[in-house]
Image: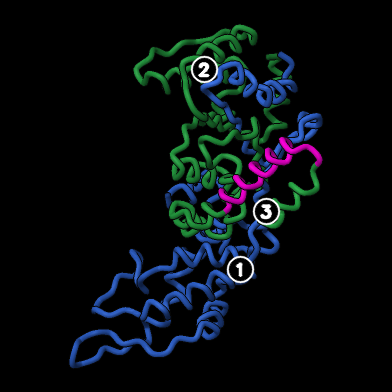
Amino acid sequence: MAPGSLLSVLTRLPTLASTSSNVQLVMLLISDSLPLRAFDATPLPQIDFPAYTKPEIQKILSLHAPDSLYSTSNRPDVEGDLDPAELKKIWNGLTSAVIDTYGVGMALDVPTILKISRNLWPEIVQPIIDHGVIEEETGEMVYGRVDFTGLFALAKRKGLFTGEEVLKRFLNLNANHITQGSFYESRV
Amino acid sequence: MRFTVELINRSSGAIESRAKFRRVDRTVRREMTFDSNPGIARLDATYPCRRDQFRMLYLLLGDPNFPSPPVVCLTGFPKGGKRSCARAFLKETSTTHIWIDCLETLSPALFFTKLVNELRRLEDPKSPRIRLNADTTSSVGAVREALQSLNGKIVLVRLLWCTQLIIRLLRILDV
C-alpha cells in the first residue's frame, strides 16, 4: 500500500461496518498536524482544540493550587498554615508571573508552567514562613497579611524571574518526566 | 423551535420537511440533554475551558442510537488536551472504543493486526491473538469478519503523532 494512502484507507474503514446493520464504526483521528491533502475530497467534521489563553491557563492551574505553605523541601517546625484563600491568591499571582516571564517567548504549555510554578513555590513562600510569629497561647505559627507584589520583588532580587537560569534549573529537558497527555490523564 | 417550524413551511415536499424536522428536533433535544447531563458537568469541572469541544463530541458521538459521521478529526496544538478530553469523554459516556497509537503501529500490517485483535477482544476478551501479513486486502477482510459479530457503535481512536514524519518513515521503509 502506498504510504500516503493509509489515511485514505482509514477514513474509508467505517464503510466496512455499513455492510452489517448492527454495528457502526466511527473513526476518531487525533492529530497535532493533519496532512490535509489526504482529506481533500472528504468534508470531515473537525473539532479544533485551540491553544489556551492566559486566563484559561490560570483557570486550569488554579485547580492545582497548593494546600499548604510547606512542602517536602521545607517541613514545618510548628503547627499552623496560611488561609486557603490566601494560598490560592499567591498561587494565582505566581502562575501569572511565570506565564508573563517565560510563557510568551518560550510558548510554554500548561504542564510545563505547572512544573515551574510548583518548583518555585517553596522559594516564593519562604519569606512568609520566615516572618511568621509563634503565638504563645496556642503555640501555632501566625502569618501576617501577604502581598504577592512584595513576594515577587523579593523573588526577583534572588534572581528567580530573570534570565534562563530557572528554566535550566527546573526543566530537565532530557528527562522525559511529562509525556504527552500524562498531565491531564492523571486527573481523570 | 421556531427554526424548525420555518423549515417545515418553506420546504416543498411534506415527507422531506418531516425528516428535516425530526433531525433538527433530535439535535435540539441532544443540545438540551448536554446542558443537563451530570457527566458533562463532571468533565467540564475536570477539564475547564473545553466545553465547546465536549459539546461537539457529544453531538457527534454522544447518542448510541443516533448515527455518527464515519470520521471525526480532533486537531490542535500539542498539549491542548485532545487525547485526554477524548479519552475522558468516551469513558464518561461509556462508549465502546479502541485506542490505537500510530507510534505502536507504524506499518499498515501492524495497524490492522492491532485493530482486528482489539475487535475480537470486544466480542471475547479471551480470544487468541492473531497476526496479519502485509496484504491489505486480507486485512480488510479480517476487519470485516471481526465486525460481523459485534453490535452498537464502536469508536476507533487513532492517534496520529507527527503524521508527516511517519508517512516519510513509511516511504523510506517502502511499506
- The kind of secondary structure element at disc 3 is loop
Snapshot quadrant of residue B163: top right
Does the rendering let one see residue B36? yes
Q: Position of residue B145 (x, y in %)?
A: 52, 11
**Which residue is identified by label 3?**
A50
Chain letter of the residue beneath label 1 in the structure image: A
Question: What range of the chain is rendered magenta?
Answer: B12-31
- The kind of secondary structure element at disc 2 is helix
Which shade is chain B? green
Q: Where is residue B172 in the image (x, y as percent from the top left)?
A: 72, 19
Q: How many labels does the image show?
A: 3
On screen, residue A23 versus residue A11, left or right, reads left
Q: Which of A24 and B90 is in front in this view?
A: A24
Residue at (81% x, 40% y) in the render:
B12
On screen, residue A64 versus residue A94, left or right, reads left
- The kind of secondary structure element at disc 1 is helix
Amino acid residing under circle 2: Leu
Q: Which callout, 3 or 1, points at the residue further toward the start of the chain?
A: 3
Snapshot quadrant of residue A53: bottom right
For marks 3 and 2, give the CA distance.
Answer: 35 Å
On screen, residue A182 versus residue B108, left or right, reads left
As for residue B16 lying within the magenta part, the answer is yes
A88 to A132, vertically: above or below: above
Q: Position of residue B122 (x, y in %)?
A: 42, 23
Prevalent SS, magenta region: helix
**Which residue is identified by label 1?**
A55
Chain letter of the residue beneath label 2 in the structure image: B
Chain letter of the residue beneath label 3 in the structure image: A
As for residue A177 lying within the magenta part, the answer is no
Which shade is chain A? blue
**Which residue is identified by label 2?**
B147
Q: Can you say which quadrant of the picture contains the N terminus of chain A?
A: top right
